[in-house]
Amino acid sequence: MAEKRKSMIKIKPKKYKVGDIVKVDFIVIHPMDTGMAKDKKTGKIIPAHYINDITFSFDGKPFTKMKIWESVSQNPYFSVNMKVTGKGKITVDYTDNLGEKNSKSKKVKPKKA
């Protein structure tokens, strides 16, 4: 069973309306191990464990997909832009090289113009 990882989605600015372009920030707590480092206590190689696919969706429709490699830093931060088309839900789905799948969602609530 996949480990539930801590993650967060932020929408900037906090106040926006339909038609605005907002910045969607996503951060996840993940080791992003390259498979090239050694454990300091045991001296054994730490196996590769990194996120390799991310999809940003709005109400189930993908608007950004990313292919990630092991060279991305630990606890990676991703930022994309999105045009607000109405109320809905942003979902970020991600998978790592070990098959672990996780998802995080946030409601989109535009203010009236």
Image (cartoon, rainbow, N blue to C red):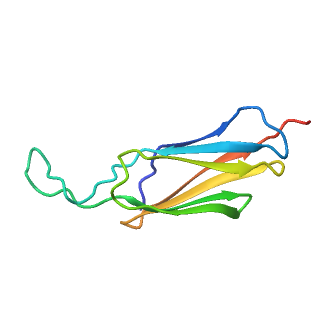
Q: Is residue 107 above or below residue 67?
A: above
**In-image side of 22 versus 4 (left or right):** right
Q: How many marks?
A: 0
Residue 16 is left or right of residue 68, and the answer is right
Quadrant where the C terminus is found in the figure: top right
The image quadrant of residue 3 is: bottom left
- Above or below residue 78? Residue 52 is below
x%, y% of residue 58?
A: 71, 56
Whether 71 is drawn above or below 76: the answer is: below
Q: Residue at x 55, y 45 (%)?
A: 26
Tell me the residue at 68%/51% (across/down).
90
Q: Is residue 15 left or right of residue 78?
A: right
Relative to 67, say whether 11 is above or below: above
Residue 110, image x, y percentages:
82, 40
| Place of residue 9 in the rendered image (x, y in percent of width and height, measured from the top left) | 59, 43
- State the residue in front, 94 or 76: 76
